[in-house]
Image (cartoon, grey):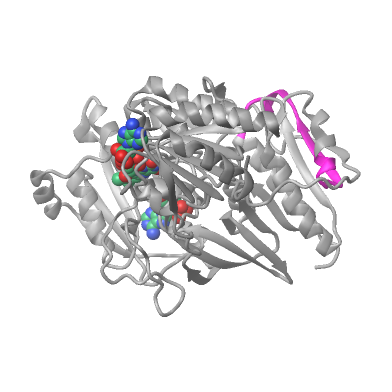
Amino acid sequence: MKIAVLIKRVPDMDVRFKIAPSGTAVDESGLKFDISDFDGYAVEAALQIKEKQADPASSEVVVISLGPDVVQETLRKAMSMGADRAVQLKYDTPLHDSSAIAAALAAELKTGSYDLIMFGRMSIDTANQSTGTYVAELLGVPIITAISQLTTSDRQLTARRELEGAYELIECDLPAAVSIDEGIARPRYPSLKGIMAAKKKPLETKPAQVGEERYKLDKMELPPERAAGRIIGEGKDAVPELVRLLKEEAKVL
Amino acid sequence: MANMNVFAFAESRNGELRRAALEAVTAARGVADSTGGQVHAMLAGGPGIGALAEKLAGCGADVVVVLEGAGFTNYNPEALAATVAARLTGGAYRAAFFVASAQGRDLAPRVAAKCKLPIASDVTDFTVSGDAVAVKHPGYTGKVIQSFTLRAATAIVSLRPGAVLPKPNAKAGTVESVSSAIDAAAVRVRVTSTVQSEGAKLDLGEAPVIVSGGRGLKEAANFKLVEDLAAAFGNAAVGATRAVTDEGWRPHSDQIGQTGRLVSPQLYIACGISGAIQHLAGMRTSKTIVAINRDKEAPIFKIADYGIVGDCLEILPVLTAAVKEAKKGA
Ligand SMILES: Cc1cc2nc3c(=O)[nH]c(=O)nc-3n(C[C@H](O)[C@H](O)[C@H](O)COP(=O)(O)OP(=O)(O)OC[C@H]3O[C@@H](n4cnc5c(N)ncnc54)[C@H](O)[C@@H]3O)c2cc1C
Ligand SMILES: Nc1ncnc2c1ncn2[C@@H]1O[C@H](COP(=O)(O)O)[C@@H](O)[C@H]1O
């Protein structure tokens, strides 16, 4: 089984962002970066599939990231978790149109004859929620999006997809693409051995062949702050006051 | 751009229209009124689905394009995307609206990819002017609002659920039947079943009130207290934190937050929830937030409009009784 996992480098979300003077980016100073949440789940799911094969050594997990040289760090992290090799599609300017990004990812994937191509359900920063679908269309492979469970055999995959108050069971022949929701697997922590091994694993850098951007970022801004909260009381004695406020002030009762 | 029509995808599941359908049609109606064009809503489903056309007319559909057949009883992503794409390619539409529910989130990018058009996803606000469509799309777990301009012959816009409220606006709703653009049985992605989750009543994305529970509830059985309060409201759904779904007290589909559902109800009641940043990412845009937590330093109180410090196991039954009483009077 040959598996590709597309991973994006994103800032840690556990901060109060500042907008950069350009007005079209967040101020990156002091931010920590890591693999986008759902892409981390995808790497873990790929490694588990490889490990379940009768002969894991004959399977390969390739991680691919588009971006400036700093994405090499993200790719090394995925290799320290266990991915076999990595490809950086070098591109130094931020991109926002998922169809333009997808063109570059598809151009790379086309040459790889992968059985399974894995994406995150969405990138946690720009959150276009569509890159994987564009790539699949360009490659002519079927895609199942936002899956929370996955089982694969040699030729087929079965997946579960969460809906509002329901779920779907879906099947599809390989080769195929999937995008990963939470629930599938939590990413493992790289072991010391893994970190050492990752330093020697191959990381190839190629220029990215991005498409034309027709979805252009004009501005980034912080959302309006919520007014500070207030504590109205303690224990069950506060309930009548709460109900009054919900009725008269918030008008939601 | 005069007289250009506007397309809306009308989602259904198990033979019933979803609220997303009415939201998409309402959004399309607004744009069509400014372009002077018509709203064409597409409805797909198993035999008999066409009967729902009337409801779409009620929200402003001039034409309801009905795709009906056994191959569409379950969601059929590939055949549906091909049929919608064929319609958009042939129809000179100014814009096509989808709502980013679980189904819409899957379908809209498929259609965009087939049409070789860019997409604006998870849009909370939009304006159409000339050949450009300006949209707002929250990113960075809701901490940054991104403004984009989309330039394309047909603007494909996937709206965040709840961004547009369905509005009655009766139009003709002339039914036009279409057949699938590809053999609906010969698709590669096959949805073999759609299973209703146990106990799922009102959906989190659609409920005006959400009562949500965290680890502070102590055990799965205590979620009965949360469900009782939701039942007292009558229009409430039950949500949970990741701590709770990790414990298996509630299914993952109830999880609200960065890696769960994004919700913005009129009222969000957080019970025994600390207010971790990843949870807030999914609910901070709620209109009114109530928090009940034993620890007066819990971060949830920073964003709660109304907080009660105390034991939720003790407060919930009292609140449920008071809400019942208030509803009786209303
Ligand atoms: C990558 C990533 C993604 C994540 N995604 C999500 C997500 O999508 N959604 C999400 O929710 N979390 C998510 N998390 C987890 C998040 O960081 C928190 O761990 C989680 O939200 C905590 O849930 P909690 O508030 O139920 O539990 P806790 O943080 O343990 O809080 C329990 C609270 O209950 C209070 N309490 C205890 N007993 C009582 C009582 N009897 N009465 C009243 N109050 C009581 C306590 O004071 C405490 O504040 C994510 C984490 C990571 C790392
Ligand atoms: N720059 C990138 N490099 C590699 N993969 C990416 C990149 N951008 C997006 N992806 C993949 O596409 C998925 C969906 O991204 P998005 O459409 O931006 O929400 C991500 O989870 C990744 O798997």
**Residue interval drawn in magenta:** B56-76
- When the figure is inspected, residue B73 is found, relative to residue B154, above or below; the finding is above
Is residue B72 in the magenta section? yes
Q: Which of the pair A215/A201 is nearer the observer? A: A215
Coordinates of residue A252 in the picture (x, y in percent):
62, 43
Quarter of the image containing the N terminus of chain A?
A: top left
Q: Can you give x and y, in whole percent of width and height, for residue B99 in the image?
A: 63, 46
Q: Position of residue A184 (x, y in %)?
A: 36, 33
Q: Residue at 78% x, 44% y: name it.
A: B41
Answer yes or no: is residue B207 visible.
yes
Residue B291 in the image: x percent, y percent? Answer: 44, 43
Q: Nearer the viewer, residue B104 or B127?
A: B127
Q: Residue at 29% x, 32% y: name it.
A: A49
In-image side of A128 versus A248 (left or right): left
Which quarter of the rendering shows the C terminus of chain A?
top right
Q: Residue at x 81, y 36 (%)?
A: B55
**Residue at image point 35% right, 72% down:** A27
Which corner quadrant of the image does residue B73 belong to?
Answer: top right
Which of the two residues, B245 or A111, is positioned nearer the viewer here?
A: B245
The relative height of residue A208 versus residue B187 in the rendered view (above or below) is: below
Image position of A238 (left or right of A200) = right
Q: Is residue A105 visible?
A: no
View quadrant of ligand 1:
top left
Of all residues, the one furthest to the front in this rendering is A237
Is residue B198 highlighted in magenta? no
